[in-house]
């Protein structure tokens, strides 16, 4: 019979060594702090704007035009201006963006053309927004003679947000399983039928989510519209595409810097800022909800 | 016995992916209204060969072919081949059931609709007929407008078969159609294939040798891109001519 070997082992200590513990918890709290910085900053901004702007918000504020050199009254035409700007921008940009995305994900073959399109897209995405403003001024306002107008501003915004719409649409198209495409082609569908009947409908929720988030981006932009569309003051809402408009971000900017009644308009400035934030956050929230609902619904 | 013209006559046919020769000078005739199985270890080129029969390999940019594939006597690799018409007549069912994310009805009517059939009564008829042939009608006739993805794995695969059958194909290509299914669903599909061969010529690629032995009339054994042996399934499994075939079938490799 073989005897048992006695193995000697270090006794297991249930309690961690103090030193490690301290170091661990220090870094853990540091990471927690830095990680939550974003949330804290958002919270500070929101509460600041809310604190200063909430008392002026009323039904009259969002449904009436400004009066008495914009120190009183509402911001109805300003809201309408922003809504129209983003709406027309999206009508212009979505067909172009989705078509480009279809080209990139379904038709393009590796080569010079694809490289050029991709490079242009990344570069376009990195161009500062004021440059788009100047471009819009030179091309749409002056060269095409649209003047400072709703249309010129919408087109400028469309060019600015185009790379974003392309990349979100392309992502949505690429997320469509290859097996759907195979199934469709094996049924004797043409490539275009496959795109139109299978790939686009499957990708559509993703494309729309991208468009909504793009809308949120666009509605807050100031620089691209300041030379192309936005006016200090317009009497009422625009009656055609070729009239200048008032828009929320630009309205805040002019009231806070260029008016003759900067102090008197403070409440209106905060009220406008609050309206803009609510609008943008609301749209972002909608986009996020849509996206998570799609993820849950997706069965593949 | 009268020599019947084969549905497919594959003649000195090779497939390349870039420089890699995936299928090497294969000669093979496919007889009408029979099940022909293609077996062989992974990477032997059996799926590639199958996919070349309705030109699904066209999707892979780097692929090119040499030799001929005659479908009813016509070379399908000519410049002006109507690939759309070919795929209508030679349908395909894939390894993983891949219904579209839409209703059972939409799935089966997909092919007829893209061919311009719009009349509801006509579509209804096609759909009932296709689903009946795929042995699925009884199970789904009350949920035609529910998502095809809500069905079980075996039902989904039969839905995909119905989707192909709605085109009234002459040939159905099956690329390991049961490898993602449980044994009962597999048995159902095998039974279905045996019924279908009365009206459709079937070519099936399978990893499962017992499956090939159970359902096919002819078996082709491929290895490293070459067609090693082709013949009656009984002969191949009982008395193979080639040593490699015997070794594969007895499970010594693969």
Image (cartoon, coloured by chain):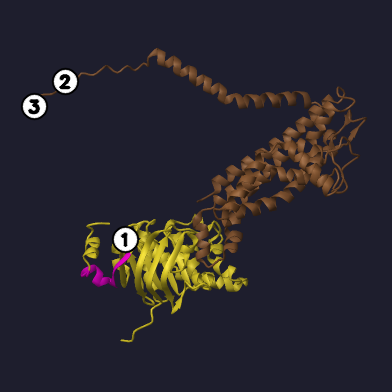
What secondary structure is marked by label 1? loop
Between circles 2 and 1, the one closer to the viewer is 1
For this orientation, the residue located farthest to the left is: A1
Badge 3 vs badge 1, beta-carbon distance below 8 Å: no
Please tell me which residue lies in front, A152 or B35.
Answer: A152
Q: Position of residue A162 (x, y in %)?
A: 68, 46
Residue assigned mark 1:
B224
Which chain is disc 1 placed on? B
Q: Is residue B233 visible?
A: yes
Q: Is residue B234 magenta?
A: yes
> Rounded to the nearest whole Å, what is the CA distance between mark 2 and mark 1?
57 Å
For mark 2, name the chain: A
Give me the disc on residue A6: 2
Query: Is residue A126 or residue A232 the one in the foreground?
Result: A126
- Chain B: drawing colour: yellow
Disc 2 crowd rating (10 Å Cα; few below 14, some 14-19, many 20+) is few
- State yes or no: residue A124 in magenta: no
Residue behind mark 3: A2
Magenta-drawn segment: B226-241
Measured in 3D between alpha carbons, the distance from the residue under mark 2 to the one under mark 3, in whole angstroms, is 12 Å
Instruction: Tell which tag, 3 or 1, sits nearer the viewer.
Output: 1
Does label 3 lie on the same chain as label 2?
Answer: yes
> Do the CB atoms of the residues marked 2 and 1 lie less than 8 Å apart?
no
Q: Indicate the chain coloured brown by its letter.
A: A
Residue A138 screen position, x and y as percent: 80, 43
């Amino acid at each position: 019979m073989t005897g048992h070997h006695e193995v000697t082992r270090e006794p297991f200590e249930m309690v961690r060594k103090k030193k490690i513990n301290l170091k661990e918890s220090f870094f853990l709290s540091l990471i927690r702090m830095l990680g939550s910085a974003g949330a804290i900053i958002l919270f500070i901004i929101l509460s600041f704007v809310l604190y200063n702007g909430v008392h002026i918000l009323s039904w009259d504020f969002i449904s009436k035009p400004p009066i008495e050199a914009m120190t009183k009254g509402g911001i109805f035409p300003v809201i309408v201006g922003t809504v129209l700007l983003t709406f027309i921008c999206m009508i212009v940009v979505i067909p172009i963006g989705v078509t480009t995305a279809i080209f990139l994900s379904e038709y393009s073959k590796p080569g010079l053309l694809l490289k050029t399109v991709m490079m242009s897209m990344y570069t376009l995405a990195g161009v500062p927004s004021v440059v788009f403003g100047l471009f819009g001024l030179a091309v749409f306002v002056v060269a095409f003679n649209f003047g400072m107008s709703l249309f010129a501003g919408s087109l400028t915004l469309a060019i600015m947000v185009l790379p974003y719409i392309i990349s979100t649409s392309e992502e949505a198209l690429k997320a469509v399983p290859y097996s759907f495409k195979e199934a469709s082609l094996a049924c004797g569908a043409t490539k275009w039928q496959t795109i139109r009947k299978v790939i686009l409908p499957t990708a559509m929720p993703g494309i729309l989510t991208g468009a909504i988030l793009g809308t949120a981006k666009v509605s807050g932009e100031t620089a691209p519209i300041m030379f192309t569309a936005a006016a200090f003051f317009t009497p009422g809402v625009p009656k055609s595409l070729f009239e200048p408009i008032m828009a929320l971000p630009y309205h805040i900017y002019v009231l806070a810097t260029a008016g003759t009644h900067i102090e008197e308009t403070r409440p209106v400035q905060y009220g406008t800022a609050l309206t803009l934030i609510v609008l943008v956050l609301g749209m972002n929230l909608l986009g996020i909800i849509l996206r998570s609902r799609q993820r849950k619904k997706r069965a593949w | 016995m009268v020599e019947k013209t084969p549905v497919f006559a594959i003649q000195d046919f090779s497939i390349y992916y870039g420089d890699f020769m995936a299928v090497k000078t294969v000669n093979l005739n496919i007889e009408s209204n029979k099940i022909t199985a293609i077996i062989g270890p992974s990477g032997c080129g059996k799926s590639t060969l199958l996919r070349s029969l309705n030109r699904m390999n066209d999707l892979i940019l780097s692929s090119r072919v040499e030799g001929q594939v005659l479908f009813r006597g016509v070379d399908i690799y000519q410049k002006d081949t109507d690939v759309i018409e070919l795929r209508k007549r030679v349908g395909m069912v894939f390894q993983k059931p891949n219904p579209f994310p839409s209703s059972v009805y939409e799935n089966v009517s997909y092919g007829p609709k893209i061919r311009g059939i719009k009349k509801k009564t006509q579509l209804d008829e096609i759909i009932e007929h296709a689903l009946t042939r795929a042995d699925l009608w009884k199970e789904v006739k009350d949920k035609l407008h529910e998502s095809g993805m809500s069905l079980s794995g075996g039902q989904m695969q039969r839905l995909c078969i119905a989707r192909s059958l709605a085109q009234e194909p002459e040939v159905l290509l099956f690329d390991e159609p049961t490898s993602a299914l449980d044994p009962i669903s597999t048995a159902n599909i095998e039974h279905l294939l045996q019924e279908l061969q009365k009206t459709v010529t079937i070519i099936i690629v399978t990893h499962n040798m017992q499956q090939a032995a159970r359902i096919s009339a002819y078996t082709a054994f491929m290895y490293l891109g070459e067609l090693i042996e082709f013949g009656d399934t009984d002969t191949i499994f009982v008395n193979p001519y080639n040593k490699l075939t015997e070794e594969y079938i007895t499970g010594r490799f693969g």
